[in-house]
Image (cartoon, rainbow, N blue to C red):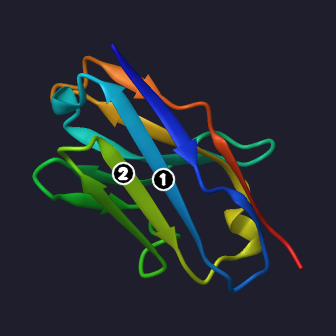
Amino acid sequence: QVQLVESGGGLVQPGGSLRLSCQASGNVFSLYFMGWYRQAPGKQRELVATLTSGGSTNYADSVKSRFTISRDNAKGTVFLQMNSLKPEDTAVYYCNAQSRQRTLTYWGQGTQVTIAS
């Protein structure tokens, strides 16, 4: 069993930066994919960025060149550095982790990110 705990959300002005962190506990070495999804009010949850334990990344087009995902495999942590934030980035951000075959999926409780003047 794996638990995911996010931190780092908050209120930031447009153009600002935030860094989200997610700490996994339990069998962290089983987590091939780790990443971030987000859900804005009235919208479906969407992928933001994922990173495999081998270093392969996948970003949503809307965040490419602004967001950077990184992870520490040994510690079971994943980070999302978000720069040049826009109001449309406002959402609840969820940490996600999956096994290599995607047969096991874990979610964090979510952290609110609000971009407003």
Disc 1 + disc 2, Cβ < 8 Å: yes
- Residue that badge 2 annotates: 78
Q: Position of residue 97 (x, y in %)?
A: 35, 34
Residue name at image x 25 percent, y 17 percent: 103
Decide: is 58 above or below 115.
Answer: above
Q: Name the residue located 76 percent from the left edge and 82 percent from the top edge.
A: 14
When the figure is inspected, residue 108 is found, relative to residue 46, above or below; the finding is above
* 27 left or right of 64 in image: left
Q: Residue at x 16, y 31 (%)?
A: 29
Q: Earlier in the sequence, mark 1 or mark 2?
A: 1
Quarter occupied by the N terminus: top left
How far apart marks 1 and 2 lie (CA) works out to 6 Å
Q: Quadrant of the C terminus?
A: bottom right
Q: Residues within 10 Å of mark 1 (few under 14, many from 20)?
A: many
The spot of residue 69 in percent (x, y) is 36, 63
Q: Residue furthest right?
A: 117
Amino acid type of the residue that numbered disc 1 sits on in the rendered structure? Ser
What residue is at 72 percent from the left and 43 percent from the top? Answer: 43
- The answer to whether one can see residue 28 in this image is yes
For label 1, the residue is: 21
Measured as percent of width and height from the top left, residue 72 is found at: 24, 53
| Picture coordinates of residue 116, whole percent (x, y) | 85, 73
Image vertical order of residue 1 relative to residue 28, above or below: above
Residue kind at label 2, given as amino acid type: Val
On screen, 60 above or below 54?
below
Residue 105 position by quadrant: top left
Front residue of 52/17: it is 17
Farthest residue toward the left?
54
**In the rendered picture of this protein, how many numbered marks are placed on residues?**
2
Whether residue 46 is visible: no
